[in-house]
Image: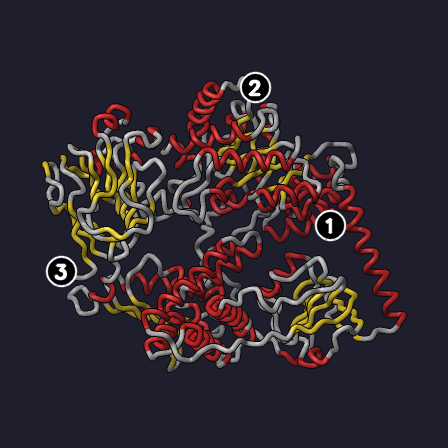
């Protein structure tokens, strides 16, 4: 038997049935994955194969296992047994424990559970993609330990090389993306291959790269106009190669160009990476690599040590928020890059230490990228260097060392700055940044811009000679850095800086006043929140309430779902932080691009159109009931508003309205609690008037509404550049929502990304939006813009925007109106 094929045995004696026999659509329709079911006649659930216990909920009614071939199984005793609260169940294992086939996992009182559950039939679900489940004959009684199924897994891609089903296929295509295959296109190619088992390579000239490795693809140095061969081998080679080839031909999600992009030359002088003006004193940051031992303590020890360090860094990155989260995700992909790991494994196998091996792997990848001579690609070397230093620091136990202490008004100068170094700085005392190397699209440049820190890059090695304490004017707007400035230069820069700070201070001070337009129309400016920390920042920025609390932050990056008390406590802290300001809590919005391990779901051809948002909540009313109880217990009724994501029509709304009424009765809450709808689908937008007659409010989520309206999947690199919420088609749907809400006597808000854009404010208000929920940092600026507006002018502008032919024309109209 192939090592990647595992035989599953019956976890207990009972009637062996196909998954369709389970009287629950979530299982029967394979929403969570393929599988089978057994109706038990004994009260001990045993392991169907050897593996590791991933999770056991506190209620002990289910268990998740990872088998030896990597496949994950969910075994769920009975239906709706979570409602028993653990009564009748006794877990015999804990997360992380290794088990053999036949080992007891959970003991349960057969009679008590049968009396309290909807049914005893127990689904066993294969919750991992890339595996094939084959069942023995169903519709019969089986004894515990009898073979019932086989799982064939991911190593089939290796076996298929010598099997009769092996397929080889290749295509030649021309790369038309403006900057060739740099970081983002490389990541998109790797992501496009996830559904396939075939091995795919890109060949350029005499170089070949694993198409699943971002690092390897960058090393090819493929520029715009280059021809590449896409070659695949495996059971689905043709489909995999076609997917990559079509992605390349579509432009890789980048702008098209028929000529190679001009390289960013270091000798051209300073380049603005983040706008702004700073006056302060120079401080040189000279980070040195730590010495690492060359020899290891044994292959097994060093492999384990490296795996633990990589996991620790990955866990740390998983906690990033905002702009840092996007960069952290790219870094997590590099930590799992197959070429980096292969090189490190080879070094360890040769007797090297984990730190030495990881440094060698990142150095080799960096050299390959530098050899391309492409300045845009070479900006990714900083990311590799950052991860090298972070991992080495964990391995040596020196994490956190070397962060400089900044005095007020510090202008930091360095050869280059790494994202982790920036995140460790005291930005309150950081006036500006200037680096000798680097580029304007580097990750640290993105972080600086997000934090509002002026930054120059590619300033040349001359800046490294500036002595600590030297007075400096850094003007990123005109890409200049002046040392020892004259009194006149200092005076002029100070006046400009003072004027900017005065404007921002005025906006910040006025942000705490209720927002009204110039004609007196009241517009509420709320904040989008994802944590207790966000709530404090929102209050400090002048938010008048929370227009969207993303509750999934409580559910993601963990092995088990939060219980009612943990949720209640968190909601209560956020409500208290907001004071008496309204708090709109969005119910759980997972599924699609936000999966969780304790709710395993089968592979979906298009997760964006699958079981997500309110659809998942309706499929799992136990989770919905628990969350509603936690919300109502944690947030005062007068402050609380609840919002449902991914609603298409009233059929999605009414069941939750009924469930909310039941929970209110259970908790003895007589005061009405508003239940609104998040408008994210064109269907809901077109039915806004109908929905608003029953829902208490409407709030538009522009990110999903835009992708569904424009038929452009946010997760599809080939079309992601088409997603623009300022598209006239999207604005017309916003107009439908505004009209529908007004006719029903309800208010309509917006909590999507477009609400944070001051340029969009006059158009949205003209379309009938009376509440904008933005990121906390943008609130003062948005309030300042809104206070200048007149409703009649906004309505006229909105009508022009809806009749425009492109997002670019819409923006031009808005800029003219705000000039």
If you read the primary sequence from the N terminus, does the residue marked by circle 1 or circle 2 appear first?
A: 2
If you read the primary sequence from the N terminus, does the residue marked by circle 3 or circle 2 appear first?
A: 3
Label 2, secondary structure: give it: loop
C-alpha separation, residue under disc 3 versus residue under disc 2:
64 Å
Residue 252 percent across, percent down from the top left: 46, 63
Q: Would you place residue 649 above or below residue 812 in this image?
A: above
Q: Quadrant of residue 268?
A: bottom right
Label 1, secondary structure: give it: helix
Q: Would you place residue 479 above or below residue 699 in this image?
A: below
Residue 536 percent across, percent down from the top left: 64, 43
* Residue that mark 3 sits on: 1
* Residue that mark 1 sits on: 816
The structure residue drawn at horizontal position 83% and vertical position 57%, both measured from the top left corner, is 498
C-alpha separation, residue under disc 1 versus residue under disc 2:
47 Å
Residue 326 in view, yes or no: yes
Residue 257 in view, yes or no: no
Taking depth in this image into account, of 232 and 426 the one nearest to the observer is 426
């Amino acid at each position: 038997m192939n090592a990647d094929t595992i035989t599953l045995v019956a976890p207990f004696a009972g009637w062996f049935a196909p998954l369709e026999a389970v009287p629950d659509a979530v299982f029967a329709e394979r929403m969570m994955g393929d599988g089978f079911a057994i109706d038990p006649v004994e009260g001990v659930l045993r392991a169907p194969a050897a593996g590791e216990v991933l999770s056991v909920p506190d209620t002990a009614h289910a268990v998740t296992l990872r088998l030896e071939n990597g496949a994950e199984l969910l075994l769920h005793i009975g239906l709706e047994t979570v409602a028993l609260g653990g009564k009748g169940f006794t877990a015999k294992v804990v997360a992380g424990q290794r088990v053999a086939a036949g080992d007891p996992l959970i003991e349960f009182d057969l009679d008590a559970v049968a009396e309290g559950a909807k049914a005893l039939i127990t689904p066993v679900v294969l919750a991992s993609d890339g595996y094939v489940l084959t069942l023995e004959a169903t519709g019969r009684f089986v004894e515990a330990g009898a073979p019932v199924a086989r799982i064939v897994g991911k190593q089939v891609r290796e076996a298929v090389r010598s099997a009769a089903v092996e397929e080889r296929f290749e295509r030649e295509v021309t790369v038309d993306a403006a900057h060739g295959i740099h970081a983002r296109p490389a990541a998109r190619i790797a992501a496009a291959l996830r559904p396939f088992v075939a091995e795919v390579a890109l060949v350029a000239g005499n170089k070949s790269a694993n198409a699943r490795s971002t690092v390897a693809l960058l090393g090819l140095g493929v520029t715009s106009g280059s021809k590449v061969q896409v070659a695949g081998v495996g059971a689905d080679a043709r489909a995999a190669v076609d997917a990559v080839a079509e992605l390349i031909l579509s432009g890789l999600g980048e702008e098209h160009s028929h000529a190679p992009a001009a390289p960013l030359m270091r000798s051209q002088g300073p380049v603005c990476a983040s706008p702004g003006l700073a006056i302060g004193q120079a401080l040189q940051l000279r980070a040195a690599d730590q010495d690492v031992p060359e020899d290891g303590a044994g292959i097994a020890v060093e492999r384990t040590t490296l795996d633990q360090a990589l996991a620790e860094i990955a866990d740390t990155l998983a906690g990033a928020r905002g702009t840092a989260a996007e960069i952290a995700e790219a870094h997590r992909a590099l930590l799992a890059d197959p070429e980096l790991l292969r090189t490190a494994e080879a070094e360890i196998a040769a007797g090297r230490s984990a730190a030495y091996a990881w440094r060698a792997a990142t150095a080799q990848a960096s050299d390959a990228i530098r050899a391309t001579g492409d300045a845009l690609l070479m900006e990714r070397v900083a990311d590799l260097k950052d991860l090298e230093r972070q991992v080495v620091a964990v391995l040596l136990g020196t994490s956190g060392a070397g962060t400089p202490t900044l005095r007020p008004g510090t202008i930091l100068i360095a050869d280059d700055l790494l994202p982790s170094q920036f995140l460790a700085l005291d930005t309150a005392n950081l006036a500006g940044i200037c680096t000798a190397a680097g580029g304007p699209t580097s990750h640290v440049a993105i972080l600086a811009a997000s934090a509002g820190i002026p930054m120059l890059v590619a300033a040349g090695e001359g800046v490294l000679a500036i002595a600590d304490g030297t007075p400096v004017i850094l003007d990123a707007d005109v890409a200049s850095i002046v040392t020892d400035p004259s009194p006149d230069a200092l005076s002029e820069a100070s006046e400009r800086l003072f004027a900017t700070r005065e404007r921002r201070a005025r906006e910040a001070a006025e942000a705490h006043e209720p927002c009204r337009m110039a004609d007196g129309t009241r517009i509420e400016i709320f904040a989008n929140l994802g944590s207790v920390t966000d709530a404090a920042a929102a209050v400090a920025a002048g938010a008048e309430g929370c227009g969207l609390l993303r509750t999934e932050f409580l559910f993601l990056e963990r092995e088990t779902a939060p219980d009612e008390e943990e949720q209640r406590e968190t909601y209560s802290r956020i409500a208290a932080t907001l004071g008496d300001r309204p708090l709109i809590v969005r119910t759980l919005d997972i599924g699609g691009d936000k999966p969780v391990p304790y709710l395993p779901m089968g592979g979906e051809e298009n997760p964006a159109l699958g079981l997500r948002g309110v659809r998942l909540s309706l499929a799992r009313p136990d989770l919905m009931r628990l969350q509603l109880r936690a919300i109502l217990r944690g947030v005062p009724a007068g402050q609380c508003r609840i919002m449902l994501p991914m609603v298409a029509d009233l059929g999605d709304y009414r069941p939750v309205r009924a469930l909310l009424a039941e929970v209110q009765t259970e908790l003895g809450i007589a005061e009405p609690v508003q239940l609104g709808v998040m408008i994210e689908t064109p269907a809901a937008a077109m039915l806004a008037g109908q929905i608003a007659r029953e829902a208490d409010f409407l709030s538009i989520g522009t990110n999903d509404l835009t992708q569904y309206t424009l038929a452009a999947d946010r997760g599809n690199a080939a079309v992601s550049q088409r997603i623009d919420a300022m598209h006239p088609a999207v604005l017309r749907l916003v107009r439908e929502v505004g009209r529908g809400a007004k006719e029903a006597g309800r208010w309509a808000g917006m909590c999507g990304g477009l609400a944070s854009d001051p340029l969009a404010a006059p158009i949205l208000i003209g379309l009938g939006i009376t509440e904008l929920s933005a990121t906390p940092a943008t609130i003062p600026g948005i309030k300042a813009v809104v206070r200048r507006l007149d409703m009649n002018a906004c309505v006229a502008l909105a009508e022009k925007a809806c009749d425009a032919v492109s997002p670019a024309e819409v923006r031009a109209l808005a800029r003219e109106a705000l000039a």
